[in-house]
Amino acid sequence: MKLSQQQLNLFSDFGFLVFRQLLSPEEMEVYSREFNAGLDSWIDGGKHDGKSRHYASLMEEHSPFISSLADDHRFADVAEQLLGKDVLAIAVDGNYHVSDTLWHPDTGSLDYTAVKFCIYPDPLNGSNGALRVIPGSHRDPFHSQISRDSETSYNLAQAEVPSYIFESRPGDVLVFNVALWHAAFGGNNSRRQGVVVYYEDPDTPEAAAAIQEQMRGNHRAFAQKGRPMYGPYWRSVDDVRHQRWLRRLAELDSLETH
């Protein structure tokens, strides 16, 4: 999947791109089925209670199609084009979100770059939990100027902060720079979101250190769930690029929990 120069410009300047119907209806049927099976396998009792956010890896045998999306050219090749270099597939996760998700970026450092693809198995709009992004907020100085306290800083409710609303139907995919500020409002207590995340393959000490710090946090989150971030199924994928990702993460001391 080859991106146009206009798409690359749009992503560079605004921090996100939208791909309508990137996944077919047939693929989304499989995605929806595997999503539930994969997330529920991490829950005691096998069913989300809707009381708090639940997230889990979808890189296991319960979700082979979803896991394979990290290797899919529609995702991996696009990530490489957006970042302009080799990437590392970091996560294929799923979330049952509960209520609102307030404004935040997905990284605490601008020393490395990364992208997140978001996939929603259910139709969403501005009133029921569609993702919102603040265009251009992935770069300083704008990134650091944004306040989490919108009422004090702007006299605006969180949902009133100016943004782009990703209204979607199953099969649509949004990809954004993880430094982009984003949020969601009005969702129900089991709003489904799937993600595929890639980090740059770092070529500076600063980027490597930032990724190592982020990965330590990622591993801690999974350790609290009692499972490794990268299990046997993910490690066994017989693909040249996939195995390079694993080797590179090992070189960065970021493949295992510490």
Image (cartoon, helix red, strand yellow):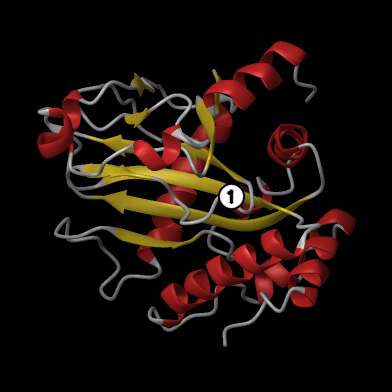
Of 117 and 212, which appears nearest the observer? 212
Q: Which residue is mark 1?
A: 197
Tell me what residue is drawn at x 40 percent, y 42 percent: 144
User: Toward which corner of the image does residue 191 lie, by quadrant?
Assistant: top left
User: Toward which corner of the image does residue 212 lie, by quadrant?
Assistant: bottom right
Q: Locate residue 220 relative to residue 211 in the image: left or right.
A: left
Mark 1 crowdedness (10 Å alpha carbons): few <14, some 14-19, many ≥20: many
Q: Locate residue 246 relative to residue 100 in the image: left or right.
A: right
Residue 39 position in % (x across, y down): 40, 60
Tell me what residue is drawn at x 85 percent, y 55 percent: 241
Q: Is residue 42 above or below residue 132?
A: below
User: Toward which corner of the image does residue 48 lie, by quadrant?
Assistant: bottom left
Residue 29 position in % (x across, y down): 49, 35
Tell me what residue is drawn at x 51 percent, y 29 percent: 174
- Residue type at numbered disc 1: Val
Q: Locate residue 41 relative to residue 20 in the image: left or right.
A: left
Residue 110 position in % (x across, y down): 56, 50
Q: Quadrant of the C terminus?
A: bottom right
Of 12 and 243, which appears nearest the observer? 12
Q: Is residue 79 above or below residue 88?
A: above
Of helix, strand and loop, which one carries label 1? Answer: strand
Residue at the farthest top position: 6
Q: Is residue 2 above or below residue 114?
A: above
Tell me what residue is drawn at x 45 percent, y 82 percent: 223
Q: Locate residue 83 relative to residue 243 in the image: left or right.
A: left
Of 185 and 200, which appears nearest the observer? 200
